[in-house]
Every structure is written in structure tokens, then in C-alpha cells.
Amino acid sequence: MKMKKICGMLLVVVLAAGSLAGCGSGAKQEEPVKKDAAKQEDSKEKLEVFGDNLKYDPNVEIAGGEDVTLNFWVPAAWEEYYTKWSSEYSKIHPNVSFEFTITSFDDHWKKVPMAIQSKSGPDIFWMHNSVNEIMLPHMEALPEDKFPIDQVKADFRNVEANIVDGKLYYVDMGLMTGVIFYNKDIWEEAGLTDADIPKNWDDFREIAKQLTVKDDKGNIQVAGFNTNNAEYIWVDLMYQQGKWLFGPDEETPVFESKEALNAAQLMYDIYNTDGSGSGTQPKGEEAFANGKAAMIYCWGWASNYFKSNFPDLNYGAFALPVFDENSFPAYGRTNGDVSVGVSKYADDAKKEAALDFVLYQMCNDDMIIEYDVFDGMAPSKYSLSDHPSIQEEPVLKVEAEMLDKSIWPGAVPDNYFSDIQKYIGQSILVNKTEPAKALEEAAKMVPEGLKGRNFKTVERKAAVADEMSDQ
Amino acid sequence: MKKKVSISKIIIYIFLLLGTIIILFPFFWMFLSSFKTMEEIVAFPPTFFPENPTIANYINVWSEMNFGRYFLNSVFVLVVKTLIILYTSILGGYVFSKLHFRFRNGIFLIVLSTMMIPVPVTILSLYQEMVWVGWIDTYKALIITGVFNTFGIFVMKQFIAGIPDSLIESARLDGAGEFRVLHQIIFPLIKPALSALAIFICLQIWNDFLWPFLVMNSDSKYTIPVGLALFKGRFYTDYAKQLTGAAITILPVLVIYLFLQKQFVEGITMSGMKE
């Protein structure tokens, strides 16, 4: 009897849910403003061409005016942004509409490659340079006639480094780098002013010591400095000393050098010799948000983390100190977020529309600025470094200042950085391992993680390459 | 008269209590954190009870995301798929335990061996099949691909094997066909086992993430685990929303468990009838 009741209830739920499921609207489709715009077509005035060197002419008809729907796959965080801008694009080209598939960030790169290889994937998708290895074979390169390389280079940084086998698939929308965030309230309480912002590591260590608060037992209450969860600062310290991360074959990581030891020693000294940091504190951004760290090393994204979740946090940012402020080739490493990718399997009309959308993205300053502010990056486009929206954001402003002295190592597999964190960073900061020993371990383990990975660093293509001592 | 409590019993209860606390602690943490602000969730030192309880996370989860829709989709897939799997498991279990035919044991071994193949190995080819038959972004891809469950067939075979053959023989002598035997003789006897299996299957379906994520492209067809994953950001996770979503998600599983608890325990402990 009971079983009958259960079955009956389940059936009701099935029917209710089934009927609801039947009402599904399918993938999110941007309602193009087709009809109205089409009516206005005849009376439409010529739209203004925009862009710096690379130009976008909105008056050029796309796909011969045929209706085109682009399948656009983006992680949830980018849904609002791309929904808005695709809608703006459809206002210019009413025959082009967009159908969105929203993915989770972590799993975007499981779904997209699988779908695209089986030819059931997107026409256009959110791309990242870390997946070059798996995605580039399925992507349409930017054609020279629509994207003249000299014009692209005149507008954007890092273009040469982004060229793979003579082809350019995307440009950097923005470039992110690591900066020092400092808590202004703690800074002022310690009697420090903006004039005290350190330019070199020696001064930085003194200030970190001054900002550190300990209890009677010597336990850190407020760390002067925290780089937990961003221990790959070691990489920046290498570049600051003019040392490449990889050998001349562009794929073998290098750990045996006095610069490598200097970098590791500095980390050791700040935490263990000076006692200004603790490996057992929470992640840098969380300790900072809770007033448990006066200064942290973090990448630009953290500005939005603080803005969204800790709006009352009073903080500033300054450029990463260097070993010698009078002579240094680079502040450190940078990485970019790139323009959208286009599937090479899309049909001709879709491909034309998708590539046109990429050009629209590259020439549209408002679109680039909104992207960069949202992501916590400085624009890769030269003309936008001084844009008011960038200058009024303390972190973005500092990043913009650092960009021309930053190096992109290329599409280096993520596990290189996570292994650096583990075998150098955490080993030194948490386990207090002697720097030389930590480097020895890293020299053994990091190459293991890179075995079988098809990549070559492009660090030697950096604009500051000539200034590096390690030629 | 006072009942004497032995020391060993006290020790056992202390251990059980500790075990219960350890198991339940993360659930309480999750539930309580769903009433905290993000600021409080990452506070150091952490707080257990919310200092300023808020239901804003629940409002945000339901308003910012299509969570209601994901919930209904999950319930739909759960109910339909569970019913089908239970039925196919009974069929398979009956065939492998009570029908006699050549190579029966060999075929059963082949069926069992499919449990040894890791899901990621088959997922690529299965996905390609879905593309070929045009089932990508349809519920068919979610439901039909998993209607035969090896574990379910195995469990049912074990339970049905315990039912005396004489019972089935006498039904056959009375003129009952195999389906009638199955529905009218076997089915009422395996209800506890079926409840236990239903819970295992429900949990599996309810928590399934990878396959639904891969084959569904429309936001309106996502299930809860897929929806929950959308809260995970690129550089940091919105713990407040993710914990709230998780708290909502486990409620139906709890309800199912409470609903079928008695039969579940019976099913687990039932030793089967003997001839």
C-alpha cells in the first residue's frame, strides 16, 4: 500500500516536472532587434568607423545580409558582459544574433574541446592562452586581410609573443600582473605615509617588519607581508634579476643559478628571518580582507574580490619592489586575457560573422575597458593605458605602469606554476626548508610535471628581452 | 529497578557520538554558513554560528540564477531515470538469477566487468554517439544513456536469488508467465531491497555533474550540480552562494532518505529467504 502511495507521488512529480521541462526555452537567445533595424536600414545614416590603427567599419555588411546565429560559449562570469556586447553588435548587424551556452569556469575546458572536436561545439567561445595546446588546432586564425598584422602590433602589446607558427589567433584584451596591496589603515597606524612606499626589497623588508604585530608569545597577529597562495612570486624575482625561467631550448625549467637562490632566499628571509609573515596564515587575499595582513602580493583580480565582498576595506597598491630600483629589466611576470576564439569548423557565414565580432571587440575601446576593469587588468591596447577608468582604479593604475616592464612567459602549463608554489614557495614559507634544498627539490620535481607537455616558452620574445642579463 | 549500563556500551556510544559529530559537522557548517555574509565566511578566526544571520544568500541564489528551474530539471531526471533503472535492474536481476540459459554466468560476468571501466574512458565515445543521434542538449542524453545500471542489476540478482525457486515454480504451474511472476511474485518480495537500491541510485543521479554538464547546452535544461558549478568563479569562489545552493540541494536527498529509511535499513540487513 505504502509503495503504491510512493509511486503515485513520484508519478505526480514526474508529470509536473515533465510539463515544466517541456516549457523550456532552450539556449539563451539574444532577441535581435532585426525587424525594427531592418525597417530602418534604408534610412540609416552611415555609422562612424572606429579604432586606432586597426579600424572597424560598422557599415560593412556581414554574411551578405543573411541571417546568422552564432553559438557563443562563455563561463558564467562573462555571461552578462558578452550578452550586453553581443546585443550591441546585433544593433549594428541585425542579421547576426547570438545563442549563449553558459559554462562553469572550472569545466569550460572540458566541455569546449570535446564539443568542438565532435563538430557540435560553439562557433565562438571564451578563450584563454593556457589552453593553446588543445584549442589552437581547432581555431580559425585571424586573417591578414581583416587583421593586418602591422596595425594589430601598432595597437596591442605582446602580439609577437602571441603568434604561433606564423598565425595570430587572438590578441590580449588586457594584461594582469602581481602588485603589492597594502592596508591603508594599518599603514597610517604605523605612522607611514605614501612617501614610505618601498621601491626595493631592502626597504620593503624594513616596512614589513614595522607593520608586523605579534602577541606576547611571538605569534603573528597581523603579518607585515603575506604571499600565501601566490608563492609563484619567485618567478617575478627571477625576472627582476634578468634571469629567464627556461633554458635556451625554451622548455627546460632552470633552477640552478645564483639568481634562483637569491629569489628563494628573499622569500625565506621575509618570512623566517624577519618573521614578517607566516605560512600558516590563510590565503593572502583572505588574511588581507580580515585585517590580518598589512601587505600582500596578489594579482590584479583581487581588486574586484575586495570590491565585491569587502567594500569597506581601505587599501592601496604599489608596484612590486625590485632588487635594484636603478637597474632592473622587469618587475615580473604578466599574463593576458585574450579576445574570443573562433571555431574553424563554423560554416563560412558564421565564421565571417564571428571574425567580425572579434574585430569589433578589438576596436571597441569601451568594450575593452569594461572587460579589463571587470577582470582587474590593465589594457593591452597602448592607447588605453591612460584611460580615466584605469587611472582611477589604484590597482589597475599600478598594473598599467608596470606593463611595459613585464614578461609573458607564454602558454606555460599551469602545473609549472603550481609546482613552483609547492616545491619552492610552500616548502620555504610553510616548512621553512633551506632555500638551496627547496630549489634542489624543485629541479627534480618541476620537470617531471612538464614531461609530455607540448609547449615552448616565448619569454625571450618579450619587449625587454635585450635588457635581460641571461642572454 | 535501575537498569545497569555496561562500560563497554558507554564507550561504544561515545565513539558513535564522536563519529556522528565528525560526519555531521560539515553539514552543519554548510547550513549555518549559508546564513553568513561572504565576509564572515572567510573571517579569521572563523565563526561557527552566524553573527548577523541573513537570508540574502537564499534570495540571491533564487533570483540571480535559474535555480528553481535547475531544481525542477534535477527532480524530473531523478524521478524518471530512477524508475527506469529500478525496473531494468529487476528485469536483469530476475533473468540472471532465475532463468536458465546457455552462457548465463558468462554473460553476467561480462555485464559485471563493465563496472570496472572508468567513466572518463567511455565519456568521449558516448558523447560522440550523442552527437550522431542528435541527442545533445536533450533529456534523452541524460536519461537513456544510463538506464541499465550494472550495480543495480547485481544487487537485484543477489536479492532475487534468495527467493525460493519453489515459489516461482508453483506460480508457473498455476499458469503465470514470466512477467506475471516478476510483477506479482518477485516484486512484492524485494521492496526493501528496491528501496535501498533506489537511495543509492537517487544519490548517484542527483549528484551527477560531468555528464549533464557536457551534454546539456541550454541554461534552462541544466541540473542542480551544473547550476551550482556556475557559482565557482575564475579566481575565487562565491562561497556564500555555493554553500547556500548546496544546502538547498541536499534537502530532497534527506527527504528521500527519511521517506525510505525504514525499508532502506531492512534492505541492507535483509539476509534473504532460504529454501
Image (cartoon, rainbow, N blue to C red):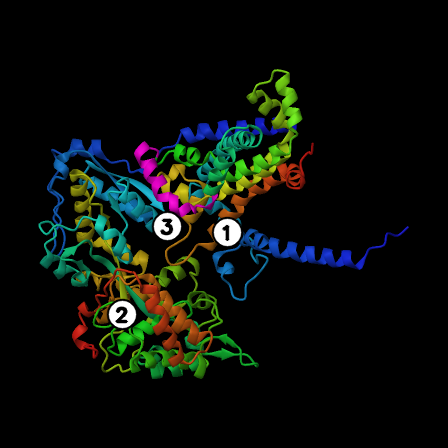
Name the mark on residue A278: none
Residue under the image location 40 percent in, 47 percent down: B120
The residue at the far front in this view is B102
Parent chain of label 2: A
Tell me if label 1 and label 3 are in contact, CB under 8 Å. Answer: no
**Residue, disc 2:** A252
**Residue, disc 3:** A107
Judged by depth in the image, the label closer to the viewer, 3 or 2, is 2
Q: Nearer the viewer, residue A454 or B98?
A: B98
Name the mark on residue B243: 1
Parent chain of label 1: B
Q: Earlier in the sequence, mark 3 or mark 2?
A: 3
Which three-letter amino acid code belongs to the residue tagged 2? Thr
x, y (%) of residue A304? 36, 59
Asked if residue B129 lies in the magenta stretch, the reply is yes
Judged by depth in the image, the label closer to the viewer, 1 or 3, is 3
Q: Nearer the viewer, residue A66 or B19?
A: B19
Judged by depth in the image, the label closer to the viewer, 1 or 2, is 2
Is A201 located above or below residue A135 in the figure?
Answer: below
Q: Quadrant of the C terminus of chain B?
A: top right
Magenta residues (range)? B115-135
Q: Nearer the viewer, residue B51 or B6?
A: B6
